[in-house]
Image (cartoon, grey):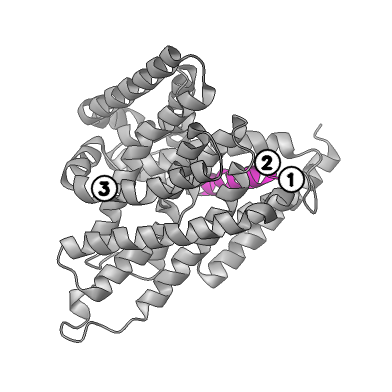
Amino acid sequence: MPDTLFLVELGGVVLVLAVLARVGARFGFSPIPLYLLAGLAFGEGGVIPLVTADDFIEAGAEIGLILLLFSLGLEYSARELVDSMRSNATIGLLDLVFNFVPGFVAGLFLGWGPVAATVLGGVTYISSSGVIARTLHDLEWMGNRETPIVLAILVFEDLVMAGFLPFITAILVGGDGTGVVLSIVLSLLVVLAVLAGAARYGPALSRAVFSHSDEAMLLGVLAIVLLMAGGTQALNISAAVGAFLAGIAMSGPSADRARALLVPLRAVFAAAFFIFFGVQIDPGGIPPVIVPAVALATVGAATKFVTGWIGAHRFGLRRRGRVRAGVALIARGEFSIVIAGLAVAAGAEPELGPIAATYVLVLAIVGPLAARAADRLPPSPTTGKAQST
């Protein structure tokens, strides 16, 4: 029989999450920063440390990470990713340089080693697809002329992450130089093999998984994503990468059905993931890093804005469209926490977790608020609203 304290404690955590989700919905921003704050409150040194539910939340966090990345992979086909990489290489590489380098340099400036600095560069590089998609939907920007540019940059980033995650996992595990190189090469070969297989056999896989029964469909999808995640992890590649690749391999009606069926499940376990990340961080470690974290967030907001501005300018958009593209990219969220979480679990630089948490807290709130402010800008005087929407 389940322990009474466990059920009460877990029920209390879920109740807090429900309240925070309502608060986020009420004020029109992602609940991710609120979940992180709740995790800080429930962790060691927090206001109400967990006693019996921490193991369950840890397991739920791992499933949440897998479902987050799988859902992200469902948004793309292998061919779309490759085509996007080719057509948006210039702005994608510009985005990589502008937003990875500040984090990497900041890590070295703080006296960290190259591995921890590389992780911080990944944290500052990747925008939050989840937060940005929600912002675009809430502000009714999906039909705007700048939105395809924003989405193209996000797709490029996600494909970079498919290679970055196994790379960072390999260097965090460490070992001799030959072992690290072999692990990285193996990871990249697996990624390329899955992308090639998805492009050729994805439709056949999707037809095999598809079912009109919600129960059969959901169980089949979960089996594929968990087996793929477990298989890649057995090869010392992040389970998150396996889940992402499993999502890419699924297409057509199966992807649409899987996306709809997984929404409530993903919401629950993704919340557990953000909670667990916060639980791992001692709140007492945040005040000493507030200044560098906020400074890094300020730089990160500026570099993402410049990225979006240049991307929109290249496609001939005027001032309002450029501003919208810039502010839309500011938010950081799930992927930044995924990267930082790998480093925290590996026992990397102690300050990395608090800085990453503070960085995401700031930009996950500032991004949507900046987008709402940009939405109130008047149309360009010589072109009218049609030029930027």
Where residue 6 sits, quadrant-wise, is top right
Q: Which residues are magenta?
A: 264-282
The earlier-in-sequence mark between 1 and 2 is: 1
Discs 1, 2 touching: Cβ within 8 Å: yes
Disc 3, SS: helix
Residue toward you, 254 or 69: 69
Q: Is 371 contained in the magenta span?
A: no
Q: Nearer the viewer, mark 1 or mark 3?
A: 3
Residue type at mark 2 is: Gln
Residue type at mark 1 is: Gly
Task: Identify which residue is drawn at 20% across, 27% down.
Answer: 200
Q: Position of residue 27 (x, y in %)?
A: 55, 71
- Mark 1 and mark 2: Cα distance apart in space: 6 Å
Check the image and report above or below for 232 versus 66: above
The earlier-in-sequence mark between 1 and 3 is: 1
Label for residue 92? 3
Q: Main secondary structure of the magenta part?
A: helix
Disc 2, SS: loop
Label for residue 280? 2
Q: Quadrant of the C terminus?
A: bottom left
Label for residue 172? none
Task: Identify which residue is drawn at 47% across, 70% down.
Answer: 369
Label for residue 43? 1
Residue toward you, 46 or 32: 46
